[in-house]
Image: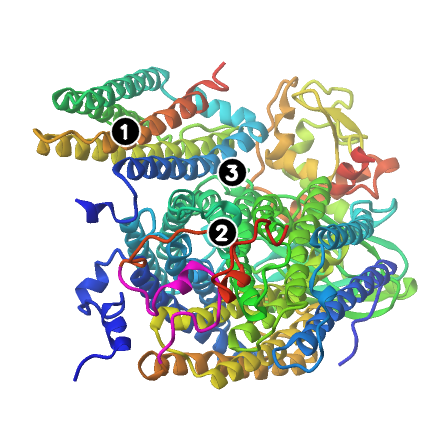
Amino acid sequence: MAPTPGLQIMQRSYLWQDGTVRSWLLTTDHKRIALLYMASITAFFVLGSFGAALIRLHLISPTGAILSDETYSRMFTMHGIVMVWLFLVPSIPVTLGNFLVPLMLGAKDLAFPRLNLISWYLFIMAGALVVYGLFRGGLETGWTFYTPLSTDYTQGRVLPVVAGVFLSGFSSIATGVNFIISIHQLRAPGLTWYRLPLMLWALYATSVIFVLATPVLSITLLLLAFEHFFHVGVFDPALGGDPLLFQHLFWFYSHPAVYIMILPGMGVVSEVVSTFCHKPVFGYRFVAWSSISIAAIGFLVWGHHMFVAGTSLYAAVVFSMLSFLVSVPSAIKVFNWLGTMHGGAIRLDAPMLYAMGFIGLFTVGGLTGLFLASLASDVHLTQTYFVVAHFHYIMVGGMVSAYFAGLHYWWPKITGRMYPEMWGRTAAALLFFGFNLTFFPQFILGYEGMPRRYATYPAQFQVLNVLSSAGASILALAYILPLIYFTWALFRGARATDNPWQATGLEWRISSPPPVENFITPPVVTHEAYDYAALDHPDAAPRAEAPHV
Amino acid sequence: MSEHLAPYDSPQHRDETAIAGMWLFLASEILLFGGLFLIFVVYSHTRAAGWALGVRHTSLTIGGINTALLLTSSMVYTLGVEAARNENARGTILAGLGAAGLGVTFLCLKGWEWHTELDEHLFPGPGFALGGLQAGGAQLFYSFYFLSTALHGLHMLVGIGLIAWVCLRVYRGRGASLRVLPVEVVGLYWSFVDLVWVLLFPVLYLIGRV
Amino acid sequence: MNWLPEASAHASRVDILLAGLLLISLAVLGLVFGLMMLNIIRFRVGSRVPVSAETVAHKSWRFEIGWTATTLAVFFALFVWAARLYVLGFQPPPGAIQIYVTGKQWMWKVQYPGGQREINALHVPLGRPVQLLLTSEDVIHDFSIPVLRIKHDVLPGRYQSLWFIATQAGAFRFYCTQFCGIGHSRMTGTLIVLTPTDYANWLGRTPASGSLATKGEALFIHNGCSGCHVSQPYAPDADDTSRAPSMVGLYGSEITGADGQHIRVDNAFLHDAILHIGPAHGQAAGYATRMPSYRGVLGEEDLAALIAYLQTLSPSRSSGMGVSAVSARKGN
């Protein structure tokens, strides 16, 4: 039987051309590395979610249902560290980013393909160290490692965990360097900066944070490890050292890290909203530059984590003002997405449902951020469940929704197969509903004063906690569903065409899945990004003027 | 050869990209040491007396010699880069070995300095030698001292390794045309390691001495 | 479940701020979800509503500047509102009752000026300003009283201040809200607000081994402080201040530091000076003897007592002085 054209594409694609384990583990193909990363972060996501499930189960009862105080502390520390450094920070950049940056640029690979592979190995080693530390002994400091608790007062396995996080930082830096240099150096002829897809602007901004903020975390962790190991060091209050200095250094990384998590999500949403409205992104340049300004101002707001920590009044006032300022570009993006929808031809496929979920949940997260940027209300709400709910709205409601939006959107390109659409929509709706049920009650809990990281709590908080735990079980279902149908679709899904969504962008001009060398003939870009007129009427001459600001 | 060019248009494009990548990596490194320098800025102000006491106990002689060694090493390496540009493989290897040798001497001196300091109980902890009122500040200084010199020493080791690798590469490739790029990229890194020391030297040995 | 009570005027003001934030948030949320729904209904592929040409063509920069400017203005107003309330926390009123609170894994130790002590409970009178002086013996804790809408981190080796005037009698919870180890969630206690008469009765009923200042006086003599520092009538010769500065009238005064800047002597300064840390440690200059560090000799509870005693030596200035009051006053 002669192979069909579809089968031929499959066989020539990066996915199936050489199927040996060796060829996967030694690959420098950015598409394969993206898949290696995808498998790894999925594993870490499952691990982190398992911790979350135990936490929510435990909190059904005010006296704690299943865990000891010690195990509970270790569990939320594990959940935080695994989710932040082994899932959220890498997530979109290393999977979708790795896969798409060269494709969107019209390049054959990233600028430094071998560095890309090294970054994955660093990441795996980092993950192994963290998991070793957390499961052989455990750690109870929270993911924030505040001194002197983490240096002198914990019995936990600080060193392997800190070493793991330290290594994962180098993996991030490698990815950041790779993306920035690729975007500078490897753009296809005609692909000017203002013709770049907004995803690339977002990833560029993210990479800047990777490169400039991560080393500060590295040095902070080094100082922490030194102090923990020798029981003397620069944060030691017994020597007159200042434990607040640790917090300054830690948040100098960890606040921008929040933007590492959310900016790529914003990039994905810009792509998805434009495609499923079949309309250029409203205010392209404003959206592009808002990514850059979020990254820039994001470096100047770390102090808002320390309004009650004992910093000076003046620092608090300045950081509060800057924190309000950093939310302006985010608001610009939300309004521009809504503007994009206006007058478009909207299709409500699963990626669009996820993207709309992102816009809604991110808006809630952003607005509750104002409660925490405001000084007097922050004093009441900080370090309670209000904060927990706030950052989960950004990171889970926002970031994870965007990640799923991107996965569904590019799944046909990545695998050459369609996912089952009805299941996709069901999972998107479940995610939105389950997420709100889990985390909205936590806003009220926080206002009522329930502190975070409590293994037991006063009985008056039980009703809301049970609601939250019930929501978590629905949320779990919304995570398990895609895991099942994506696996199914990988082998049994309907064959995808090259451009199933009628999207613009270079990645949709090549076969699904892409051939090993990406572009058989090097592409030349003659249109703005999101030029649907050129897509719908390929014969018409490109318009002389840019269709948007 | 063409498949080795994979994502690049031309060898020149590839070299440009590699140089840009190195610069970006060094920007990242600056922030790494930047966090360390913040420690210095804060404590040399808030714990000035104890900090200065620590500075006075460092060995200015060894520090001075080491600074001279490292500056010379950078200069020698730059000569090597020039030699490589002139396709002079022998000159490149000699300069590389010279620079690496000076680097090793630096590390030996540094190791000796550490050894004497450990003997004098200058490592912070119980039994710290500098007692009295300012013991806390002096211990903060020595925490900073050991950590920053260790981190810099680690960078030195990496740099020496890279130089050795470059020399080996040039040696193996005798006869064929010499690729300047690796020599240049390693040169950037070596200069950076030098620069960090030039900033560390006054902080560890001079400021607060008098 | 009962709604969280407002046990002070500040709590009510914070609640009004929160209500304002909530209203603005609901308005924005309504706008975002409303527009999203409207767009879907009108522009969904296959919807029956005809799209007129002018709804699609629009100039974008006017919208951009419009919503950017509006967002900025609203944010700035919120910022000023919230910051003004926050500043109050740095300005304790004169005449506040000073209560020392020490955090320790995993309990709160409370010391009253009269020498009464208790654990995980805090008694305060209704309608009188109270200033808490917070410190920790080990890791960082955080003292949070939700009904008063205030909290502050509690750091080892230094004083932090919180003040309030309770306006509602009753028993309320306070919490440790900075993760401090596995016993974190057990580190809670009860704030008991009593009417002034009940409070006086409670103080009278509670056993105290002499007032805090009396205990401090004993420590002052026992640890040899009185050997160098003048503190009438115990100093051998009351006028000799060559060896060490006099403690009489020192608290609340302003002295010149080693590098020429003016430092106000408050609780935090004295605490640090006795332990030889922070900006206070350079003070020994100009006297015949150098003061040894009392780190490891005096615990946080002893320090609280000593400072309470030193306050009695400057009666005119002895209350309403907090740690943070100093920095606020410098700025105003």
Horizontal placement of C16 versus A160: left or right?
right
Q: Residues within 10 Å of mark 3 (few under 14, many from 20)?
A: many
Q: Is residue A512 magenta?
A: yes
Distance CA(mark 3)–CA(mark 1): 45 Å
Q: Secondary structure at mark 3?
A: helix
Sequence-first disc among 2 and 3:
2
| Vertical comparison of B159 with A390: above or below | above
Which quarter of the figure is the N terminus of chain C placed in?
Answer: bottom right
Subunit that carries the residue with mark 1? B
Q: Residue at x 23, y 64 (%)?
A: A24
Amino acid at pointer 3: Leu
Magenta residue span: A495-516
Q: Residue at x 53, y 59 (%)?
A: A530
- Residue C245 position, x and y percent, is 72, 24
Amino acid at pointer 1: Glu
Q: Residue at x 35, y 37 (%)?
A: B22
- Residue C74 position, x and y percent, is 79, 54
Q: Secondary structure at mark 1?
A: helix
Q: Main secondary structure of the magenta part?
A: loop
Horizontal placement of B52 versus A86: left or right?
right
Subunit that carries the residue with mark 3? A
- Residue C279 position, x and y percent, is 64, 31
Q: In the image, are marks 2 and 3 on the same chain?
A: yes
The answer to whether residue A453 is visible is: no
Q: Which residue is mark 1?
A: B184
Q: Which residue is mark 2?
A: A196
Residue nearest the viewer, comparing B16 with A135: B16
The answer to whether residue C189 is visible is: yes
User: Mark 2 or mark 3, which is nearer to you?
Assistant: 2
User: Mark 3 or mark 1, which is nearer to you?
Assistant: 1
- Residue C15 position, x and y percent, is 82, 64
Q: Secondary structure at mark 2?
A: loop
